């Protein structure tokens, strides 16, 4: 869908009206904020053979919002560099495709940001795809889908990231800068078939990974769902929250915390892993659902389903003081239940979960089954709710069902379960139009 200048003009008018609702309006133009424009990336010369110039020009335009429309053919690109103070909205159906024969450099990434701030990438129904098979014979493991170093206030939402030559998302800091990433949110994102890790976390303060699917990582070590692995003692792993996420079928650990580069991993790190389904990981090395190198007293691990992993469900390498896990169901982990880990209040070890579907294309994917699911899995969490990432399948889950169950947001005019620029476009199309049959 392409957006013409008439609609953009209407949007600016609407924005001004909305601004007057929130703030006192003044007749003086000097007192009205300057609105940077919304730009349509295709207007910068979309080329189906190589769309890099158009997309990069739109990003470099200084616009606060860049809209990437579905052109019916992929946006084939070489490495793209992000800008501060900008949201990029990818229309549903958009495919950002790494160009064949490119990404030869060891740190060539699909999207890269270093030292940037206030970035939002929104892509519900969009895909970012690299060419993993083309890179495995090349030196280097850093051809990431999204690369963030020393960035602040970044939101990544809704897209599917697949076939990367390194991580789906990498979060770290510029070497010797002592500036970790800060305030990073990854929400409603799927990372699938990435080569190294679905998500690598090297240095960050305040990270939220929420309602993500991180699966089938293989190709280059370590091949985890999430790998919290600092490079240096100065790196930060602070207030990292992982919740309502599915970590499935990665050939090494589901979630790994190898923190040996830190002087005091027990004191230097903090975070939580809650309401996650961690399933069928570790096929290559008999690896674990959750791996901890050290005792982690500042981490909360609870309300999870940890099932059918090839090694232990949860494993702490260091003997002595033991990390505690609570309100978590372990079942079918081939190597054992836990090792050097204290199973606290509410842990289950004999209850088999039943899932409505293991097919990622199904709207019931990894929801608890509608029938014959053990009741304790629906009420065994610390708050009396369900264990794992998804409730019973009959609850509202897919976006369409959210509207069916009367839980949609009033301003979500296109019913995609996010209020953004696309809803404003729908308003603009009908702005000041009336179909009232009574004059």
Image: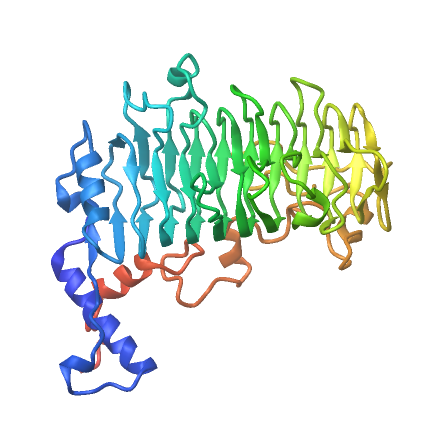
Q: Quadrant of residue 215?
A: top right
Is 293 located above or below residue 18 in the figure? above
Total marks placed: 0
- Image coordinates for residue 387, horizontal then vertical, percent: 73, 48
Residue depicted at x 24% and y 47% = 59
383 vs 265, nearest the viewer: 265
Viewer-nearest residue: 17 or 33: 33
Query: Which residue corresponds to the image point at 12% horizontal and 40% vertical from the top-left?
Result: 45
* Residue 127 location (% of width, % of height): 38, 36
Q: Nearer the viewer, residue 262 or 65?
A: 262
Residue at 17% of width from left, 37% of height from top? 53
Q: Residue 335 location, x and y as percent?
A: 80, 23
Question: Looking at the image, is 384 positioned above or below residue 233?
Answer: below
On the picture, is 158 further left or further right than 69? Answer: right
Residue 435 seen: no
Drawn side of residue 54 relative to residue 411, left or right: left
Q: Quadrant of the C terminus?
A: bottom left
Against 126, is 139 above or below? above
Expressed as whole percent of the image width and height from the top left, the position of residue 298 reads: 72, 51
Residue nearest the viewer, comparing 331 with 178: 178
Above-or-below relation of 320 to 35 = above
What colouring method underlies this structural image?
rainbow
Query: Can residue 422 be spotted in the picture?
Result: yes
Task: Please name the residue shown 48% across and 62% down the image.
Answer: 408
């Amino acid at each position: 869908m392409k957006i013409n200048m008439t609609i953009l003009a209407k949007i600016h008018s609407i924005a001004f009206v909305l601004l007057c609702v929130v703030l006192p309006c003044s007749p003086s133009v000097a007192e009205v904020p300057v609105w940077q424009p919304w730009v349509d990336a295709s207007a910068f010369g979309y080329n189906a053979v190589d769309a890099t110039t158009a997309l990069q020009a739109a990003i470099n335009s200084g616009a606060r919002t860049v809209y990437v429309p579905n052109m019916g053919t992929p946006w084939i690109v070489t490495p793209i560099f992000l800008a501060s103070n900008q949201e990029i909205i990818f229309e549903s159906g958009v495919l950002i495709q790494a160009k064949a024969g490119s990404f030869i450099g060891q740190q060539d990434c699909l999207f890269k940001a270093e030292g940037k701030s206030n970035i939002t990438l929104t892509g519900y129904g969009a895909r970012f795809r690299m060419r993993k098979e083309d890179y495995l014979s090349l030196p280097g493991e850093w051809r990431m889908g999204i690369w963030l170093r020393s960035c602040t206030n970044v939101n990544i939402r809704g897209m599917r990231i697949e076939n990367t030559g390194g991580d789906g998302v990498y979060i770290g800091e510029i070497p010797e800068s002592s500036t970790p990433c800060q305030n990073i949110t990854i929400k409603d994102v799927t990372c699938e078939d990435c080569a190294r890790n679905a998500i690598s976390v090297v240095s960050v303060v305040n990270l939220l990974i929420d309602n993500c699917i991180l699966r089938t990582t293989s190709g280059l070590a370590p091949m985890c769902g999430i790998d919290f692995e600092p490079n240096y003692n100065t790196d930060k792993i602070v207030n990292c929250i992982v919740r309502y996420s599915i970590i499935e079928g990665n050939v090494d650990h589901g979630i790994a915390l190898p923190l040996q580069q830190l002087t005091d991993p027990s004191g230097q790190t903090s975070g939580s892993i809650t309401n996650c389904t961690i399933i069928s990981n570790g096929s290559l090395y008999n690896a674990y659902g959750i791996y901890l190198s050290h005792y982690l007293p500042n981490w909360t691990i609870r309300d999870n389903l940890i099932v059918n992993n090839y090694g232990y469900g949860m494993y702490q390498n260091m003997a002595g003081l033991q990390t505690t896990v609570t309100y978590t169901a372990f079942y079918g982990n081939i190597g054992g239940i836990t090792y050097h880990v204290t199973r606290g209040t509410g842990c289950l070890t004999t209850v088999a979960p039943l899932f409505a579907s293991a097919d990622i294309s199904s709207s019931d994917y990894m929801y608890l089954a509608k029938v014959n699911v053990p009741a304790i899995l629906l009420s065994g969490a610390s708050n009396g709710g369900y264990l794992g990432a998804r409730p019973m399948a009959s609850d509202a889950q897919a976006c369409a069902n959210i509207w069916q169950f009367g839980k949609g947001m009033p301003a979500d005019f296109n019913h995609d379960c996010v209020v953004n620029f696309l809803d404003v476009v729908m308003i603009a199309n009908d702005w000041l139009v009336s179909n009232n049959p009574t004059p």
